[in-house]
Image (tube, rainbow, N blue to C red):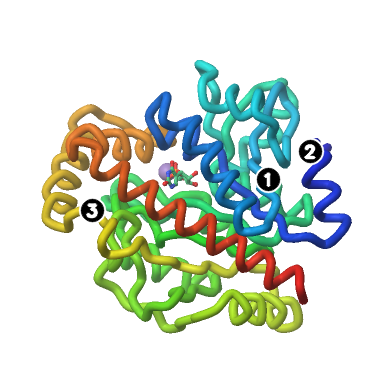
Amino acid sequence: MVLVMSEEVRAALEARQPVVALESTIIAHGLPRPRNLQVALELETAVRQEGAVPATIAVLDGRPHVGLDKEQLERVANEDGIRKLGHRDLPLAVAVGASGATTVSATALLAARAGVRVFATGGLGGVHREWTVTQDESADLGLLARTRITVVCAGVKSILDVPATLQRLETLGVAVAGYGTDRFPGFYLSDSGHPVDWTLRTPEQVAGVMRAQDTLAEPESALIVANPVPEKQQLDPELHTRVLADALHACEKEGVTGQAVTPFLLDYLVRHTDGASLSANLAAVRGNVRLAARIAAAWARG
Ligand code: PSU
Ligand code: MN
C-alpha cells in the first residue's frame, strides 16, 4: 500500500519532530455536521499549540493519506457516501479507488506504517453488550494487539461492555495505563467504574514505557493511555445511564448491525441529551489530543 504523506508530516518525521496521528471516523461518522469540520480543524490546532505536527489519516480516491490539507479535511467531513474503513477494508478501498474515513484500527495501521508512534482519539471500539448473541467486537482490539503504537483515548466507548473489553485487552496482551488515575475512564464519564492496574503521571513516563516496549514486548503490541475527561466536563452519569439504555433498545428495535452500530448509538446520545454527550465527547477528545502531543514531544526528545 503506497502512503501519501503530507509534506509537513514527512519533514517532521525526517527531522524527528513530534507528530500525532488523528483518526477520521470520528469526523465523518462520529460527530454531526457542520460541527465535525470545526472540530477536525480545532484538533489540528490543538496539536500545533502543543508543539507537534498533526497527521489526520483517511483514504481519498483509493489513496491512504497521512496528513490532510484543509480541502481534504473538508471532503472527509462533508462528502456524502464516505465510507467507514476498518483495517480489513484498506486494501479493498485502495483497489477500487474508494474514499473512506479510518477507524482506530485502520488509523493505527497506517500511522505505524508511516512511522508515527503516537495517536489520539476519543474512545476505542471494543466488545459490545450482547456479544454472546452478535459476536460484535471491534477490530480495534485485535489490531492493537499487533501494532506498535501509543493510543491516547478516554477509555473505550461507554456504549460497550467495558469489563469485557478490559478482559479482552488483557487476554490479547495490550498494555493499559490510566493517566493520572487508577480508574479506567468511561469515555463520556471520568470513571467507568472499573480500575486499571497501572497509573502513569507524566509524558516522560509514558515515553519511558514506549522505549521499554521496544526492547521487551513481543509481539509488537500497543500501549493504551487512558486519559479521563475532567469531572467538571463529564456527562451527568444519571442522564448517561438513562439515555444509553434507550439508545441500546432503539438500536435493537431498528435492527441496526455491524459497522452502523457505533455511529447509531453515538448519534442517539447526542440527540437525546440535548448535545450534552457531544460536549463531553469533545472535551475528552481535546484533552487526549493535547496529551498525545506532549507524549509525542517527550518521545521525540528521546
Ligand atoms: N470514538 C469516538 N467517536 C467515534 C469512534 C471512536 O469518539 O466515532 C469510532 C472509532 O473510529 C472507532 C470506531 O475505531 O468508532 C469503532 O467502530 P466499530 O465499533 O464499528 O469497530
Ligand atoms: Mn462492530
What amino acid is labelled 3 in the image? Leu
**Residue that numbered label 3 is attached to:** 235
Quick check: marks 1 and 2 in contact, CB under 8 Å?
yes
- Where residue 30 appears, as percent x and y from the top left, is 42, 37
Q: Quadrant of residue 258?
A: top left
**Residue that numbered label 2 is attached to:** 6
**Foreground residue among 228 and 258:** 228
Q: Is residue 84 above or below residue 189?
A: above
Whether residue 97 sits left or right of residue 13 in the image: it is: left
- Where residue 177 appears, as percent x and y from the top left, is 48, 76
How far is mark 1 from mark 2, CA to CA?
Answer: 8 Å
**Residue that numbered label 1 is attached to:** 55
Whether residue 244 sits left or right of residue 34 in the image: it is: left
- Where residue 16 appears, as percent x and y from the top left, is 83, 62
Q: Is residue 181 above or below residue 242?
A: below
What amino acid is labelled 2 in the image? Ser
Q: Is residue 165 visible?
A: yes
What amino acid is labelled 1 in the image? Ala
- Where residue 28 appears, as percent x and y from the top left, is 49, 30
Mark 3 packing: few (<14 Cα in 10 Å), some, or many (20+)?
A: many
SS type, badge 2: loop
- The residue under the point 78% across, 50% down is 114
- The residue under the point 30% across, 31% down is 256
SS type, badge 3: loop
- The residue under the point 37% across, 80% down is 182
